[in-house]
Image (spheres, grey):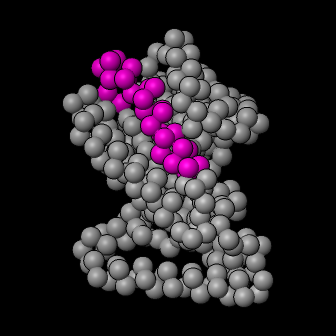
Amino acid sequence: MATHTFEGQRCLVTGAASGIGRAVAEALGAEGALLCLTDINEQALAETVSGLRASGATVLAAQAMDIADADAVLAFAEAVHAEHGSMDALLNIAGISIWGTVEQLELDHWRRLININLMGPVHVMHAFLPPMIAAGRGGHLINVSSAAGLFGLPWHAAYSATKFGLRGISEVLRFDLRAHGIHVGLVCPGGVDTGLVRTIEIVGVDRDDPEVQRLTSRFQRHAVTPERAAQAILRGMRRRKYMIFTSPDIRIGYWWQRKFAPPYEWAMRLLNAYVTRAANKQRKKV
């Protein structure tokens, strides 16, 4: 059984003010990690930092910023490296979610998703990985993809473009960084009950509609807590796993997809038809 802890290791966590990011920061802090944290929400990040320090965790640096801003990420990296040296672990957790059919999605939706979910992690890796490599201590790179980075889920075209893209980057880096002793982990969460569930943008759909509320409630009943997801991520890091699942349904679904392609396609078609029927019922009411 793995006994490795993250005590004394410098860990960067993006999206650290809420959801999985905050739960990961708290779990790492409880083990004695030295934290560098970012989030776009300045107030929520300040509250997270205050809570962590009150619990005895060490926060070396915290910066409210948009990871889609390459210059801001680079400036933060330069300040962190100048004062604290290179990181031992990078955890790309920040992200947004926008769903919609291709005829409903606007180009702005695609650009926002790509800039935050795909280019955001790229900015972090560009700024923080070279010093990690130069330090020669090895370490961890954790990229949070999604079940939508594995499966063709309904209305997820734009979102999946970013999550499949991050999966592709991680697949290459798991081999490129092996020579440097840097473990790459790809996290593929299924349902996680975070604030994102209640604020997700579904283009062309009224989130307050009773049918949509019922679907959201059903999702939340099957979702795991951010704390459970965080423990799965840390466990995967300890075991140096590449694919890290936060719930067994996605692990089983991924195995099933690869072993039984025709049933997978049938299931995706049924799911798509179900979601489309629910949306059409709502539109007829308008």
Eyeballing the image, is 68 above or below 32? below
Which region of the structure is painted magenta? 111-139
Residue drawn at point x = 69 percent, y = 73 percent: 205
In the rendered image, residue 21, in percent from the top left (x then y), is placed at 58, 44
> Is 105 on the left or on the right of 153, as rendered?
right
Between residue 8 and residue 138, name the one nearer to us.
Answer: 138
Residue reaching furthest top?
Answer: 82
Residue drawn at point x = 35 percent, y = 45 percent: 169
Q: Tell me if residue 126 is in the magenta stretch.
A: yes
State whether residue 235 appears in this view.
Answer: no
Q: How many labels does the image show?
A: 0
Eyeballing the image, is 286 above or below 243? below
In the rendered image, residue 108, in percent from the top left (x then y), is placed at 61, 53
> Is 195 on the left or on the right of 238, as rendered?
right
Between residue 210 and residue 117, name the one nearer to us.
Answer: 117
Q: Determine which quarter of the picture holds residue 94.
A: top right
Quadrant (top left/top right/bottom left/bottom right) for the C terminus: bottom right
Q: Determine which quarter of the picture holds residue 182.
A: top left
In the rendered image, residue 110, in percent from the top left (x then y), is placed at 55, 55
> Is 114 on the left or on the right of 130, as rendered?
right
Residue drawn at point x = 65 percent, y = 27 percent: 63
State whether residue 42 appears in this view.
Answer: yes
Residue drawn at point x = 57 percent, y = 36 percent: 67
Q: Tell me if residue 65 is in the magenta stretch.
A: no
Majority secondary structure in the magenta region: helix
In the rendered image, residue 96, in percent from the top left (x then y), is placed at 59, 52
